[in-house]
Image: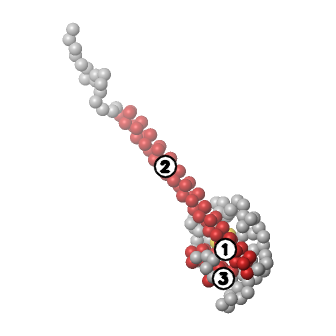
Amino acid sequence: MKYHPSPRGSNPRGMSLLELTVVILVLLSLVAVLFIGSRAWKRSGDRAGCVLSQRNIQMATRSYQNLYGYNYGGRPYAENGTQDIARHLYEKGYIERRLFDLATGVTTCPSGGTYSCTTPDIFPLSGQLFIQCSLSDSEGHIPQVYTDW
């Protein structure tokens, strides 16, 4: 008996068009999942940076308030011609220039929101934030718990 291999033997040397299409679809699906995941990761990182900035300014405000004996809802003494709390914090070294720019609205949060301080010359009441991000309602740029700050 003679062996006559067929043109498409049992050991083909390559991939069929169907196999190639399946491999390409799987790779494209993985790339799509990667892009979606990285976008969500970036948004959550931006949110965390925004909340951290609010926390740092809040903690500096409370430290300054406690150290100099100011009451909640009180005003600081005028120093260098201003009662602006953020300016006092920056000039006395409680916050760095980046946080001062955030508190005064010069720069934006990592997601592009703006910070606002309704009363820049009054210490916030207990359980209230000194500054708030404009994205606090839409993208959750507000700390979940901040009453102990």
Indicate left or right for 3 with 91 as reference: left
Q: How busy is the neighbourhood of tag 2: few (under 14 within 10 Å), some, or many (20 plus)?
A: few
Residue indicated by mark 1: 60
Q: CA distance from mark 2 to mark 3?
A: 45 Å
Q: Quadrant of the C terminus?
A: bottom right
- CB atoms at circles 3 and 1 under 8 Å apart? no
Q: How busy is the neighbourhood of tag 1: few (under 14 within 10 Å), some, or many (20 plus)?
A: some
In this rendering, the label closer to the viewer, 2 or 3? 3
Q: Residue furthest front?
A: 67
Is residue 64 placed above or below 34 in the rendered structure?
Answer: below
Residue indicated by mark 2: 34
Q: Position of residue 29 (x, y in %)?
A: 47, 43
Q: How busy is the neighbourhood of tag 3: few (under 14 within 10 Å), some, or many (20 plus)?
A: many
Identify the secondary structure beneath mark 3: helix
Q: Position of residue 92 (x, y in %)?
A: 63, 82
Indicate left or right for 12 with 137 as reference: left
Please state which amino acid type lies under the numbered disc 3: His
- Counting labels gives 3
> Which residue sits at x=78%, y=70%?
126
Q: Is residue 147 visible?
A: yes
- CB atoms at circles 2 and 3 under 8 Å apart? no
Query: Which disc, if any, is residue 13?
Result: none
Is residue 134 placed above or below 42 in the rendered structure?
Answer: below
Q: Is residue 105 visible?
A: no
If you read the primary sequence from the N terminus, does the residue marked by circle 2 or circle 1 appear first? 2
Q: CA distance from mark 2 to mark 1?
A: 39 Å
If you read the primary sequence from the N terminus, does the residue marked by circle 3 or circle 1 appear first? 1
> Which residue sits at x=28%, y=22%?
9
Residue indicated by mark 3: 88
